[in-house]
Image (spheres, rainbow, N blue to C red):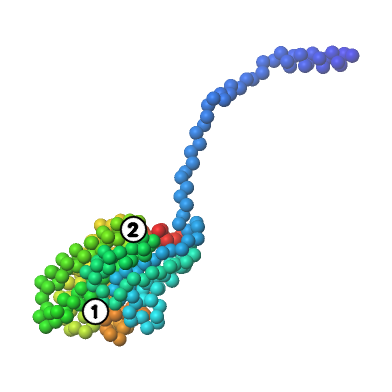
Amino acid sequence: MKYIFYLLCIILLAGCEKQPTFAVDFTKKESISFEEYVIPYSFFPRTLQMVGIGDSLTKGVGDELKKEGYIGRVKTEFLQYKGIEDVVLTNTALRGRRSDQLLKLINKGDIDYAIRNADIMMITIGGNDLMKIVKKDLFNLKVESFEKGLISFENNYMKIIDKIRKINSNAKIVLIGLYNPLSIVAEDSSEFDTIINEWNATIENIANDDENACFVPIETLFDTNGNLVYHTDFFHPNSKGYQLMSESIMSSLIDCGFIDDKDWELLF
């Protein structure tokens, strides 16, 4: 009986002790911040729409391996990147085309559908503009003729890009430069090299004015035929020349921020 009495006393004494209290404010809410998650381009497998515009270089004239010149090789490269399930190439280029003829084609609207649906466009134009001047004044070439031709070429090129942007404001545009095909047939082509540099600077400036455009220089690839980069016509690239062009294009796309070479991802 006494044990029961002691047990009751312990319970009563324990109940009389002051118990610690905890204040809980249920009205207070802690804010939880989440970092914005950006879905990478490679997350969903997709089909890339690629469009070729311009002259014989984009047409692939001279490619004895029949791999569609530089643009066919770039297409193959794109297929290696994460998230790219397929690449659909629409090549609207035509041998012999000049800048005024390309502008006329675009103004007619004949390739609007291809431009509108493009993810990336690649353009070569200007070589035939230069050759028109050379053929016209073959035995009396003057720098003034090329300077006058450059003004017309720049005006045409700017209108071409402006028209393209009215159709498609977001696609990436790759503007490929010119090279001097006379370097391997003329003893002294330094003056013509200067002309090529001026025309290339014009193309580069047009590219720089568009945040979604990228200029690709290629003149050093064809300043000699030591690497056997010319077709038998000594004007167009052969398969090796086109391979070097595609490598320069891929390198420039990395420099322009269109490709993440570390994650192996196209950023468009």
Position of residue 32 in the picture relative to residue 151 (left or right): right
Residue 56 image position (x, y, % from top left): 30, 76
Q: Could you say whether the residue bearing mark 2 is in a helix, strand or loop? A: loop
**Residue 157 versus residue 9: which sits nearer the camera?**
157
Residue 139 image position (x, y, % from top left): 11, 83
Residue 243 image position (x, y, % from top left): 37, 76
- Disc 1 marks which amino acid? Pro
Q: Hey, which quadrant is residue 258 in on the image? A: bottom left
Alpha-carbon neighbours of circle 2 within 10 Å: few (<14), some, or many (≥20)? some
Q: Earlier in the sequence, mark 2 or mark 1?
A: 2
- Residue found at x 86% / y 16%: 3
Residue 28 lies, with reference to residue 237, above or below; the image says above
Question: Of tags 2 and 1, which is closer to the observer?
Answer: 2
Q: Which residue is mark 2?
A: 168
Q: Is residue 201 visible?
A: no
| Identity of the residue furthest to the bottom in this view | 232
Residue 64 lies, with reference to residue 172, above or below; the image says below
**Residue 228 versus residue 83: which sits nearer the camera?**
83
- Residue found at x 41% / y 58%: 267
Q: Is residue 93 visible?
A: yes
**Residue 161 versus residue 141: which sits nearer the camera?**
161
Instruction: Count the labels in the image.
Output: 2
Q: Which residue is mark 1?
A: 181
Q: Could you say whether the residue bearing mark 1 is in a helix, strand or loop? A: helix
Q: Hey, which quadrant is residue 53 in on the image? A: bottom left
